[in-house]
Image: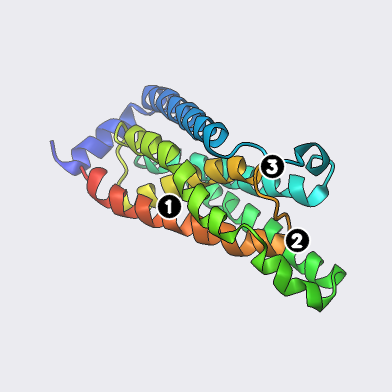
Amino acid sequence: MRTEELINALVSDEPSTRKRFGLVMGFAVALGAIVAGSLFFLAIGFRPDIDQALKSVPFLFKFVVTLSLAVAAIGLCSRLARPGAPAREWGYALAAPAILLALAVVAELMMTPSSSWEPSLVGSNSRFCLTFIPLLAVGPLACLLLALRQGAPTHPGLAGAVAGLAASGIAATFYAANCTDDAPLFVATWYPLAIAMVVAAGYGIGSISLKW
């Protein structure tokens, strides 16, 4: 069967295909979160002052950013796996965490003295951030890539990269519960760098493993 014929067959069977793949994607997300969570609790766990941190707006804001990234990327990933499925709205949704984080950085710069900007940006956990977010993302990324193989992404590299974004969002959500650097400047600098590593890996693996 030619590629065009396969796409037409998938589109014509859209309702059942969408339901079936939705279950596959849901299982992949759940399993990936379980794997990442298990590794999180075995390797690092919550930060020592978690009780106090839960009362801190900057700490809680990190989860707004990471969870919105994970949800938007998972939604887009699911659409990219189905030829012809509209994906534009999920692409727009991916801008939400970036916009929120940018606004938080602006607020921090306006409300704090310039002498505190560099310490906030550098923080004390940059090395751990660059290590543990990619490490925690391995399980979710593997699960999402396996799920995508049950679909028919027409852009394998892009689908793999978005899977990397979703896996990073899941991983960063767990890591944020351990990280003691809550400043938006830190989050806006080091989290994206760690996420970029996973996105690059997802793109490379997806380009090869998701080809029809």
> Is tag 1's residue or tag 2's residue first in the polypeptide sequence?
2
Where residue 91 appears, as percent x and y from the top left, is: 52, 52
Q: Is 76 left or right of 211, judged from the image as shown? A: right
Number of other residues with Cα within 10 Å of mark 1, as a class: few under 14, some 14 to 19, many 20 or more:
many
**The residue under label 1 is which amino acid type?**
Val
Decide which of 159, 35 is in the foreground and name it: 35
> Looking at the image, is mark 3 or mark 1 nearer the viewer?
3
The answer to which of marks 2 and 3 sits earlier in the sequence is 3
In terms of secondary structure, where does tag 1 sit? helix
Q: Is residue 139 left or right of residue 179?
A: left
**Disc 2 marks which residue?**
104
Q: For the residues labelled 1 and 2, say whether their Cβ atoms are less than 8 Å apart.
A: no
Q: Looking at the rendered structure, which numbered label has been put on residue 116? A: none
- Residue lying furthest left: 1
Label whose residue precedes the other's in the sequence (3 or 1): 3
Q: What amino acid is found at the position of numbered circle 2 in the picture? A: Ala
> Is the residue marked by circle 2 packed among few (<14), some (14-19), or many (20+) residues within 10 Å?
some
Residue identified by numbered label 3: 47
The C terminus lies in quadrant = top left
